[in-house]
Amino acid sequence: DAGVTQSPTHLIKTRGQHVTLRCSPISGHKSVSWYQQVLGQGPQFIFQYYEKEERGRGNFPDRFSARQFPNYSSELNVNALLLGDSALYLCASSHGQVGHHANTEAFFGQGTRLTVV
Amino acid sequence: AQSVAQPEDQVNVAEGNPLTVKCTYSVSGNPYLFWYVQYPNRGLQFLLKYITGDNLVKGSYGFEAEFNKSQTSFHLKKPSALVSDSALYFCAVRDSNTGGFKTIFGAGTRLFVKA
């Protein structure tokens, strides 16, 4: 079975632009989460989606948004890019069911390396 | 608010020696604890988790971790380190009081195993 796939793998954008990152979860997984990993730091939680609804949100500005589609794939959108948005963006999927989500480990994609210049 | 601390930026150990990577946490409800490993330019790989039950949990590649509620710790251990264990290790926690939908990671500990 294919793992979590993310696209693109690398991306260079200019300050002020908009970016869309995409994620396809493992088949059968209904939960997708997004993380930002700045070099030298641990992943920072951005969003959690389950059954197309936002279930959790981290401390990120409103420039960050996401959605989950009927096939459980997901997009992360970032508007008005700043230099500080340069990071590795990780997507993870898990089986996740409401009330049981905490029990399930996440499977991560290899990430999208975003560079803002 | 939930938080995770990994007090050591780096751990150095000789091949064949036991290793320990430390993790402490803070949650308001019951903790769900995880260890992940990251190799260069790769995503994170799951190693093991503690949800409930036995305080000693065993995971992939010979790793294990001990949950200590009184010390709010979840240290990662391996009896005999391999050079191939060299990587970046992350501890993570979910809080039952937030429905488990928010995973907080520590800053990571880099493990160097010397031959």
Image (cartoon, coloured by chain):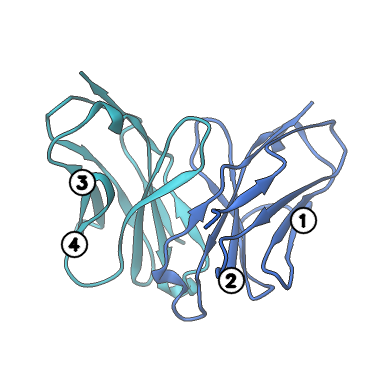
Chain colours: A blue, B cyan
User: Which numbered disc, 4 or 3, marks the residue that appears first in the sequence?
Assistant: 3
The residue indicated by pointer 2 is A30
Q: Amino acid at mark 1?
A: Asp
Instruction: Give the letter of the chain under mark 3.
Output: B
Q: Quadrant of residue B80?
A: top left
Q: Residue at x 67, y 37 (%)?
A: A9
Point out residue A78 in the picture as x, y percentages from the top left corner: 78, 48
Residue B88 left/right relative to B61: right
Nearest-to-viewer mark from 3 and 1: 3
Point out residue B50 in the picture as x, y percentages from the top left corner: 28, 63
- Number of marks: 4
Point out residue B68 in the picture as x, y percentages from the top left corner: 19, 59
Q: What's the CA distance linking mark 4 and mark 2?
A: 35 Å
Q: Residues within 10 Å of mark 4 (few under 14, many from 20)?
A: few
Instruction: Give the letter of the chain under mark 1.
Output: A
Residue B94 left/right relative to A48: left
Q: Residues within 10 Å of mark 3 (few under 14, many from 20)?
A: few
Q: What's the CA distance linking mark 4 and mark 3?
A: 26 Å
The residue indicated by pointer 1 is A62
Callout 3 and callout 2 share a chain: no
Element type at marker 3? helix
Kindly give the residue lying farthest to the bottom in the view shown: A99
Nearest-to-viewer mark from 4 and 2: 2
The residue indicated by pointer 3 is B62
Callout 1 and callout 4 share a chain: no
Q: Quadrant of residue A65?
A: bottom right
